[in-house]
Amino acid sequence: MTFRCVSFDPLRTLGIPAVSLKPGQWLSRPDIIRSADWILFPEYWQVNALVYGWKRRIFPSISSFHLGHDKVEMTRVFQAVCPGNAPHTLIFAPTDRAIEQILDEFTFPFVAKEIRNSMGQGVYLIHTRKEFLDYVRITPVLYVQEYLPIMKDLRLVVLGNSVVTGYWRQAAQGGFHNNVSRGGTVSFDSIPEGAVRLVETFAGETGVNHAGFDVAEVDGHFYFLEFNIRFGTRALTDRGIPLNQWIHSYLVAKQNE
């Protein structure tokens, strides 16, 4: 079956028949976009106009974009849908009262994050009050989370409602970040079924259909850390995992519905 696609991210859609456009070209080529069956990997600032204005089908889904927009959005839906699998997290404006509440409620070390960052950037392990106040000075939103005593975490890749692949990420010796881009190593062995079921349940309930979920395991219990719809694929490429081919097959199946 053939269908018409427009891709705003040609590297992620290699091998998928699609017209490639730069995001800045979208208003100059409305004929191509409005006649397309699928719009692939638009930028976040495009999705409302594409979906609600031009009634286009986009991939990833609109809920993937909205819920994955920043750590605040995704954390609140984790807390609502699966509260037992969300680390204890406080999100506040950076007021004096909020600062004192966080310091009263959390013991060192704890984790502080910038709400719109990925690949381990903007994630800090806070050991002292001074380190926390240094973090406060650089962020418009305080996002503070309990420290989970882990040496590795899981990356589970969702396509549709299913986990199509997954791997462990382990930090370099003496490191805090498990991200492959920060020197972490990977292993595709012994992926726990409980984590897979948790992620698939969340994806099914929320409509997130393309994302890399980061999950921690502590004493056999699983915690969502975050998910990214534009996640790093180096580990998959090195393994020869054809994610772009799986995306094409998924779009074909959805087109037939």
Image: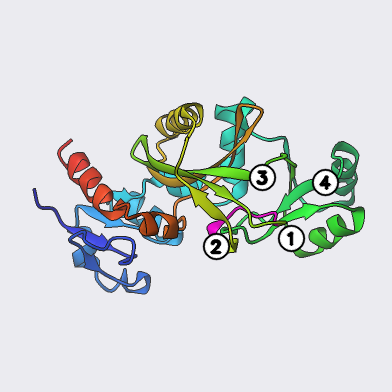
Whichever of labels 3 and 1 marks the residue nearer the N terminus, that label is 1
Task: Please report the residue visible at 47 percent of the width from the left and 44 percent of the height from the top.
Answer: 167
Q: Which mark is residue 181?
A: 2
Q: Amino acid at mark 3?
A: Met
Q: Are marks 3 and 4 in contact (CB under 8 Å)?
A: no
Q: Which residues are magenta?
A: 175-181
How far, Cα to Cα, is label 2 from label 1? 23 Å
Compared to residue 22, the image places residue 143 above or below, namely above
Which residue position is annotated with label 3? 151
- Residue 178 in the magenta stretch? The answer is yes
**Element assignment for label 4:** loop
Q: Nearer the viewer, mark 4 or mark 1?
A: 4
Crowding at dot 1, Cα within 10 Å, few <14 / some 14-19 / many 20+, comes out as some
The percent coordinates of residue 168 (x first, y second) are 52, 44
Q: Which mark is residue 139?
A: 1
Whichever of labels 4 and 2 marks the residue nearer the N terminus, that label is 4
How far, Cα to Cα, is label 4 from label 2? 24 Å
Task: Please report the residue visible at 61 percent of the width from the left and 52 percent of the height from the top.
Answer: 178
Compared to residue 165, the image places residue 127 above or below, namely below
